[in-house]
Amino acid sequence: MQSADQLQDMLRSINRKSYPAYKSLKGAYQFKKYILSIDHVQGDPFASPSHISVKISHKEAGFPTAYYKDKLTRITLADYLTRQFEQQVNRYTFRAKGSGKSGLISVTRCGQEVLERTACEITDKGITARFFVGFPANGRTINAGELEKIFFEFLPVCVEKAFIFRNLSGKDLENTIFLAEDQAYIRDELKKRSLVAFVNDGAILPRESGISSRPMKNCVAFMSPDSLRVTMELPHKGKITGLGLPKGITLIVGGGYHGKSTLLNALELGVYNHIQGDGREYVITDSTAQKLRSEDGRFVKDVDISLFINDLPNKKNTSCFSTEDASGSTSQAAGIVEGMESGSHVFLLDEDTSATNFMVRDAFMQRVISREKEPITPFLERARDLYEKAGISTILVAGSSGAFFHIADTVIQMDNYSPVDITRKARELCRDYPLNENKAAEFKTPKSYRIMSKNAPVKGPKKDYYGHFKPQDKPERSERLKVKVHGRDGFSIGKQDVDLRYIEQLIDSEQTQTLGVLLKYAVEKLIDGKRTLAEIVELLCDKLEKEGLSFLSDGYISCGYAMPRKQEIYACFNRYRRP
């Protein structure tokens, strides 16, 4: 451990030298109230910025121990501090001048949801904040004076205002912690009351725009129907009322633009805690809930879709189905089976984004095309078995097919963003419009023994006369894989793209970044041709639970990673194309 004065002397000694001299700064330095660590130094002023971390002891930070007593409060406090730090950093970024990324100070920008991130981590020892700094230069000549400003003028102010308890709003932080504990209480109540979701009265479900997740202003507040209203006594907020969706099959219907998909969207993101003022703070869904849809063209490997699809004309085996280019129906069937494997207890579906022939076959079509000629067993005929035999509830938005009324336990009509319980009315109408009885084949829970194999080496000559690989024929070695993230929508690993556009509960590019390094870790160290996909994912989830993201690091953990759910890890690995 070196002192801050030594860092200052080193900066002055390398001033105006060539940029690589910055590498000598790597290490830890004791400042008055914290330890500054330079974990990685960028190669030049135009490269990705340097990785910096700051460690503050609990004694110095001064937060009450109740605010970091367990995993829930630690994640919540870390999220709150990251938001405070970002506000402070934004005032100083690029105030130090130079070429390229010189003077950049960057920290994670959090959304409306609370996620576990590497940007701020709280342990028994203290608080660690991680961020990026662009080391200043003129051309490729070091401008150490500008970096000295960042480390000795800008950063101490940011740390003081963001991570020292006495400088923060105590009441605001207390409300943040209390909200997280109330949200956890509601999640526990869902299990006790056999509910799959809760939407509080007064919730603001519509979002500001298609590109903004902030609440819409001047819109209709949510108000639950009397027949489905439940009351909870929260530890801090006290009595709260709202819609309690029971287990089973729930149908959400209504005219176009009346709020059906808005409600479903709120429910699918209810697997995460939301910040105060979001409007969806008390919209809580079973944490295993999974949004499913059709994905034309997706990769499917060794999935048992025989529950839904059998007797294909080409005689393809659907109990171990693989394809490079799935249709809408086969992709949705695979998604449901993969969701079962990931441990989901709730499926969320929207008729608009589902394959029509997978969801339902009307009476006329059944008369025209006999059952023997149709390989698809529609979801309509399997939803009841999914609940009664596999314990998986369904929440389905329907706007065109009335067949789903016949299987629904609860029917909610959205009328100008207000929910109306029409379950009794729907049941009476079902008597007047009977559904053709088509008995599906026996329900058998799909079994998965899918072995994960590494990519096959490139075909062609292996070695030249001297025993060396030719560059164009050299097989791709897993330890040299590089991950490049393409925003929230996916990443490339080696030469392969992993498309995650339709994983709708993946909400942050930092989660995608984590999925990329998890897959890289699995390919390099876990995939051996013997372990199944489920074994590999469960092993990774166990390590994440016990060690966090530290087991993925190369000596240090950087900013820029957020924890995905197990469901999204499964979804990512299922879309990784492999032999």
Image: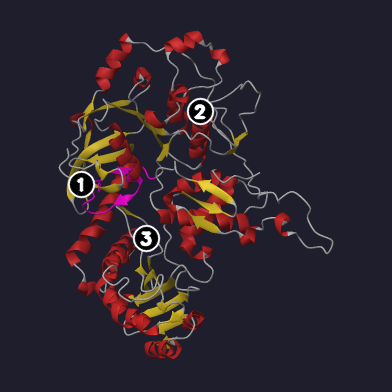
Numbered disc 3: secondary structure: helix
Q: Secondary structure at mark 2?
A: helix
376 to 548, vertically: above or below: above
Which mark is on residue 71?
A: 3
User: Circle 2: is it few (<14), some (14-19), or many (20+) Cα within 10 Å?
Assistant: many
**Residue 142 pos. (x, y %):** 44, 82
- In this image, 353 relative to 328: left or right? left
Alpha-carbon span between mark 2 and mark 1: 44 Å
Q: Main secondary structure of the magenta part?
A: loop
Q: x%, y% of residue 502?
A: 44, 41
Mark nearer the N terminus (3 vs 2): 3
Closer to the observer: label 3 or label 2? 2
Direction right: furthest residue: 465
At 39% from the left and 13% from the top, the residue drawn is: 435
Q: Dot 1 corresponds to which residue?
A: 233
The C terminus - image quarter: top right
Horizontal and vertical percent for residue 63?
Answer: 27, 71
Q: Which residue is mark 2?
A: 329
Of mark 2 and mark 1, the one earlier in the sequence is: 1
State which region is magenta. Answer: 270-287
Question: Which amino acid lies under the numbered mark 3 shown in the image of this protein?
Answer: Lys
* Residue at the farthest left position: 218
Q: Quadrant of the N terminus?
A: bottom left
Alpha carbon separation for disc pair 3 and 2: 40 Å
